[in-house]
Structures are given as structure tokens and as C-alpha cells.
Image (cartoon, helix red, strand yellow):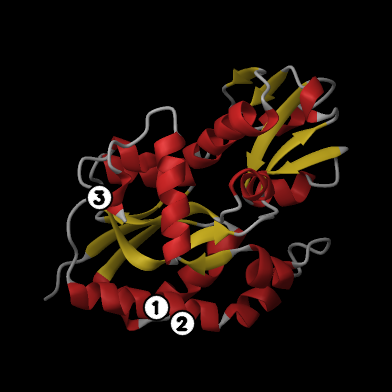
Amino acid sequence: MEKCIKISAVSYLNTKPLIWGLSNHPIMDQIDLSLDIPSVCASKLKNKEVDLAFAPVAVIPSLDTPNIVSDFCISCTGRVKTVCLFSDVPVEEIKEIYLDYQSRTSVQLLKILLKDYWKINPELLDSKSGYEHKIKDQTAALVIGDRAIDISKNHKYVYDLGECWKALHDLPFVFASWISLDALPTTFINAFNDAMQLGLDNRQKIIKDFSVSYPNFDVKKYLYQYIEYDLSPLKKSALKLFLSSMESPIEDPSLIV
């Protein structure tokens, strides 16, 4: 009997096609799948509670032996729609920003943009559930995932971090990828990639299921145009740049891509 591989994955709208692919592929017989927020995916991987995680890429510098093991990721080239800085005043007037507790990659990306793109230095605040309701006056917040859909029309200024990264470096951005600490069997990785592609090939089913849940959001456009799933060579180069630009950069980003 083959080893059961423990996997932690994110359950946002943008990952629904990938989760659908796993759930409808024979590979399900080989895995134990848990659905978590991005920061928990990263924590489980770092603590060796799982063998494979769909983790925020900012966790990579803290891992001893990170391996990106799949051809698929969550990325964008320009606007991403669900990783945004929300504010009631222009960015140059912001005095403090609540940081989303769910993903360290988006927080690190925001810090890079504050320093190199907007060239401002607001106070950065930790957050907990419900923090997005504190956006007012000169207090802004970084909000990611499905919650960003829900509040996108509530604030005058919305700064899309994928779009800002593209403006800064003219590169795509990789938010999350499939990462393991130990090498996984080639046969498993091949089947895993096949499951990912199965999910992408069935995006129309996900769109049909979730369009009702997001009546004021174009789910089809989001899953086909804004979110990109291929980990291309250009995206690997962009990932190296991001990792080297972080506050605690990895010494040799080439080791993991």
C-alpha cells in the first residue's frame, strides 16, 4: 500500500479549481487533504505536520529544504482582484495599515511596495478576525482572499497589489505554490499535476457553483483572466526577485526553483 501523503491547501475561490481536481482524481486515494487559511498551510509545512502544502511563497526562506514540486501555482500578471490595500484616503495620506493575518506573502509584498513603489512609511498593525471593519479615515487595511471580494465596493481607494508589483517591476507575481520539505516520488508528482490540470479543465463547473455565492463578482473573469495557474520560467524569475527583496531574504533563491 502506498504511503498516504498529508496535504494542506487553501480553500479560497481562486484555489477551488485545484481542490476540485484533487477531489475528482484517483490521487485522492493516496492523500489526506486538509483545507486551511494560507498562514496555517505554511505553519503546518514548517512544523512537518504535512508532507505537501499549498503555501504562501514567503514561507520559503524559513524552510530548511524547500522544494517546489508542481507546475501549478496561484499567480497573476497585473491585477489580481483579491489582494488589495483598501483605504478611504489616497495612499500618500495613509497613517496606519492593518496587515492581513491570513497570508505572510501578501504582507511581505505590501512592505516592498510601501518602500519601493509608494515610498511611504505608515505604521503597520497586526490584526485579528474582523479587522477589515476598522478601515476609516487614515487607517487602511490589507485584505486578501474572498473577504476582499465582499468589501471591494465599500471603500473609495482600492490598490491592487498584483497591479502595483507589475507597475514596479514589469513582472508577474507568484502568491502561493505547492511546497514540500522532502522529495516526493516522481509518479506522485506526475499524477498530482494531472489532477491540477483536471481541475483547470473543469473551471466552468466551479463557475456555475460559485457564481450564485458572488452575485456582484465576475467569477468567470476572475478564474480565467485574473488568476493564473502556470508556474512559468518568467514567474520563477519573478519569484526569485520577490524572495531576494523580502525583509529576511533567502540567501540563494535559485535553490528552490
Location of residue 223 (image quadrant): bottom right
Label 3 neighbourhood size at 10 Å, few (<14), some (14-19), many (20+)? few
Kind of element beneath mark 1: helix
Q: Nearer the viewer, residue 91 or 105?
A: 91
Say whether residue 116 is left or right of residue 152: left
Kind of element beneath mark 2: helix
Task: Find the residue positioned furthest to the right.
Answer: 156
Label placed on residue 198: 2
At x 76%, y 36%, the residue is 86
Say whether residue 111 is left or right of residue 215: left
Q: Are marks 3 and 1 in contact (CB under 8 Å)?
A: no
Q: Are marks 3 and 2 in contact (CB under 8 Å)?
A: no
Label 1 neighbourhood size at 10 Å, few (<14), some (14-19), many (20+)? many
Location of residue 211 (image quadrant): bottom right
Label 2 neighbourhood size at 10 Å, few (<14), some (14-19), many (20+)? some
Q: Are marks 1 and 2 in contact (CB under 8 Å)?
A: yes
At x 53%, y 71%, the residue is 17
Q: Mark 1 = which residue?
A: 195
Location of residue 91 (image quadrant): top right
At x 53%, y 77%, the residue is 200
Total label count?
A: 3
Residue 129 in sight from this viewpoint: no
Where is residue 151 drawn, in percent x and y?
78, 44
Where is residue 167 drawn, in percent x and y?
67, 47
The amino acid beneath tag 1 is Ala
Kind of element beneath mark 3: helix
Task: Find the residue positioned furthest to the left.
Answer: 1
Where is residue 94 drawn, in percent x and y?
76, 22
